[in-house]
Amino acid sequence: MASDTPLLDELEKGPWPSFVKEIKRSAGKSPKAKDLLGVVEQSYKDKITHWKHGGIVGVTGYGGGVIGRYTDIPEKFPNAEQMHTIRVNHPSGWFYTTKALRTVCDIWEKHGSGLTNMHGSTGDIILLGTDTDQLQPAFNTLTENGFDLGGSGSALRTPSGCVGPARCEWACIDSPHLIYDLTQTFQDELHRPRWPYKFKIKASACPNDCVAAIARADFTIIGTWRDSIRIDQAAVKEYASKGLDIENLIVARCPGQALEYDAKAQKLSVKPQDCLRCMHCISKMTKAIRPGKETGATILIGGKAPILRGAFLSWVLVPFIKVEPPYTEIKELLEKIWDWWDEHGRNRERIAETIGRLGLKDFLKAVDLKPIPQMVYHPRSNPFVFF
Amino acid sequence: MARTDIGPPDYRLMLPETITSNYGKWKYHEILKPGVMKHVSETGDELYTVRAGSPRLVSIDFIRDICDIADKYCDGHLRFTSRFNIELMTPKKENVDGIIGDLKKLGLPIGGIGDCISNIVHTQGWIHCHSAATDASGLVKSIMDELYEYFTEFKLHAKLRIAVACCINMCGAVHCSDLAVVGIHTTPPKVNHEKLASTCEIPSVIASCPTGAIRRHSDKNINSVEVREERCMYCGNCYTVCPSMPLADPDGDGVAIYVGGKVSNSRKPPMFSRLAVPFIPNNPPRWPEVTSILKKIVEVYARDSKKYERLGEWIQRIGWERFFALTNIPFTEQHIDDFTYATETFRATTQFKW
Ligand code: HEM
Ligand code: HEM
Ligand code: HEM
Ligand code: HEM
Ligand code: SF4
Ligand code: SF4
Ligand code: SF4
Ligand code: SF4
């Protein structure tokens, strides 16, 4: 018998694991997954999407966490007419017991298509595809089992962070705990959209920035240190004796010109005042070099995608801050930022755009921060100065 | 009445024993082979991690299969990475081969750690989104099939991060990736004048356009808007605000490729990805034009870069002029910025590399 999905079948071939196989696995049990396959095949044929603009659906007490989705070809694929998505807040660091994961699977087998994203790009577990009348029962069962919804709409989005001290020797802050604590503290901001637009918080525990916090979060927390990197000379000798070209691959690549290597003595030294804390030497000689002991974080603001005014990387707000529970300073800073943005931000304007429109000067005043050189690459060059 | 605002589960209840007892005490790690690393703690404890690729869009049965492996070898614990990979962890070295064997039985690739290509951060596309200019899952599958051995082997001098976003909302971190594929429209919205006034607020629609291309319809009898097409850069923002402004077009939609971004601070500061290929029309199911040009870029980079050099650092060293020459990608008028901050990208020096 000829296949109904000849185009998608092509994507079952090849070595990389196939999402089409996964949809088909669910299609065996769920008419919704089966019709999803049909809708997507139609898109492959027509070269356009067959999903309509969202509709407002949700669960009692929440303004978000669920995204309404309808196909524009329900007459062909009635089971895919409603294909709503539930965002479930992941545990920090994306660690799970199999018991917890199996529970989510069982709930989604009962109340949805059986298809998921592990995970969405913001970090949530994405449960893909269910009907309006299944949303509340699915939510009730999720919360009975200790899970809650993530953010959507003009609200705080599910914060996420790197694996941090759970399994990384470079962690300068406890990113899983910080993220858990902030998420718990700001449940109202997460679940009830009331801002001009979305607001994202991400934390990476060192400047390698494994969760791309600087590019993907309005409020970016990146672990760093203020004293000197620590060098274990015995381990340096070991790297040297194993043939690592320390002169060319480590010293010459140091962006701060902070390192010196005495090849005869196999001794590596650092001028701490020249170190930019970039992580290069540490990443490449992890047994010999580690971050300093006086650890904390840099806080940056404004990262966002190009919609509307163009994309930004986050800008430095606080070059160094101690990061210790209960994180009062960070929470107070967030509250001040939200107050100002809530008051001055236009509809669908991310914080960086509000700052861009009204000026960093005004923003700094509103959040009680003094201008300092770390906030800019260099001072202005034009003479058009307001006093 | 359901409980509300309980927040996510406490991650501490999800951690394997070896992690709980060595939290914050890790001393160093080693990459043993593709997809396998060993962390060693100050306490002397060891933790082995096996990383496997995933299609991200997975069925619950897939998750259950992975759980079976975690139950067999990892005391019932596992984690996912920020790039949708699966990580199985065990303090027992002798479990590593068993984990790898079982993952391979499921058809999953082992790799993604160290100087290689990791999984592709991507978005929803035709699976789920109304604003998609291309599909995400199909592009990712096609690209990873083509670049498979760069995931499972060490064939590069540094990490290479790829991202796919199916429209310029960019739900995944594409703008700072070594290689970024973005769905774009190249035709202006087609206004549905019958429906517009009843479905949308006209002032919001006008205000939604970043380039001011939308104005009230010049015919006062038509209660709708019109688009000054020469000002439209097909961002789709108006469509997000108003369903009566659709842009999707089978021939006008496709992807652009951006290159050379990164987020880590290692050596050079974070960098944006820059335009390499302005437009390739959609060609499902396998987008051969896209995969072949990405492969070409990866091959040239693998050959020409220095050890530890990320793609963007390599381009900075050799210069964009040499990048376009080496990859045979034509430089066109679209490559020259004409948006908000364009003049900052114009070169004001006599320094070039030939
Ligand atoms: C109702 C229609 C929409 C649906 C069903 C939808 C669906 C989704 C889903 C499922 C994700 C998670 C994606 C992933 O992780 O891969 C996502 C993320 C995202 N969406 Fe949408 N989306 C919609 C509308 C929009 C609109 C109108 C915008 C922007 C104007 C937008 C911007 C984003 C962005 C930036 C993300 C990144 C992740 C996040 O912020 O949570 N989406 N969307
Ligand atoms: C070789 C030793 C390294 C190991 C074992 C390692 C491990 C990891 C792990 C486990 C993740 C996933 C993190 C998460 O999901 O929370 C990750 C992501 C990441 N790592 Fe590393 N890392 C290493 C070196 C580096 C270096 C040297 C850099 C920078 C040059 C770097 C940059 C990143 C980035 C940017 C990400 C996240 C972005 C992404 O999702 O791709 N890593 N790494
Ligand atoms: C209101 C402030 C400024 C005034 C009144 C001013 C005035 C002048 C004048 C009268 C000249 C000489 C023109 C000539 O040779 O005929 C000059 C030259 C110049 N100015 Fe300014 N200037 C101002 C600010 C700046 C700033 C802020 C910059 C750069 C950041 C700048 C850069 C230059 C340069 C590069 C030249 C040419 C110097 C040369 O011939 O070597 N000026 N300016
Ligand atoms: C100079 C141009 C660009 C800048 C400054 C830029 C900047 C940004 C920023 C700051 C974000 C954070 C997004 C957010 O959460 O809203 C972002 C997200 C994203 N960008 Fe870009 N971007 C640029 C170009 C691109 C391009 C060309 C692509 C595609 C090739 C792209 C794809 C993405 C994607 C997929 C995301 C989603 C990140 C997320 O929300 O998790 N960007 N971009
Ligand atoms: S950001 Fe730094 S501390 Fe966090 S996982 Fe990555 S390398 Fe480790
Ligand atoms: S961390 Fe970076 S800047 Fe600092 S010494 Fe090492 S290589 Fe140099
Ligand atoms: S990138 Fe665009 S098309 Fe893709 S899921 Fe996000 S909003 Fe939808
Ligand atoms: S697609 Fe973008 S630029 Fe074009 S009319 Fe709509 S909002 Fe304006």
Image: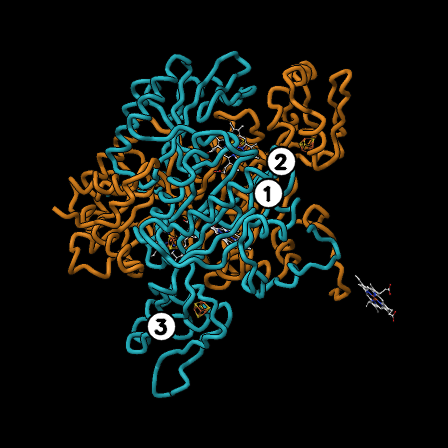
Chain colours: A orange, B cyan
Residue at screen point 35% across, 19% down: B74
Could you tell me if residue A336 is visible in this image? no
Q: Which of disc 3 and disc 2 is earlier in sequence?
A: 3
Asked if disc 2 and disc 3 are in contact, CB closer than 8 Å, the reply is no
Residue at screen point 55% across, 59% down: A353
Q: CA distance from mark 1 to mark 2?
A: 32 Å
* Mark 2 and mark 3 on one chain: yes
Q: Is residue A322 above or below residue B289?
A: above
Q: Is residue B233 above or below residue A126?
A: below
Crowding around mark 2 (Cα neighbors within 10 Å: few <14, some 14 to 19, many 20+) is some
Nearer the observer: mark 2 or 3; the answer is 2
Q: CA distance from mark 3 to mark 1?
A: 43 Å
Element on which disc 3 rests: loop
Crowding around mark 3 (Cα neighbors within 10 Å: few <14, some 14 to 19, many 20+) is some
- Which residue is labeled 1 in the image? A299
Crowding around mark 1 (Cα neighbors within 10 Å: few <14, some 14 to 19, many 20+) is many
Badge 3 amino acid: Lys
Could you tell me which chain the residue with mark 2 belongs to?
A: B
Foreground of the two, A272 or A64: A272
Which residue lies most toward the left here?
A1
- Which residue is labeled 2 in the image? B306
Nearer the observer: mark 3 or 1; the answer is 3
- Which residue is labeled 3 in the image? B190
Badge 2 amino acid: Lys
Q: CA distance from mark 2 to mark 3?
A: 49 Å
Image quarter in which the N terminus of chain B is found: top left
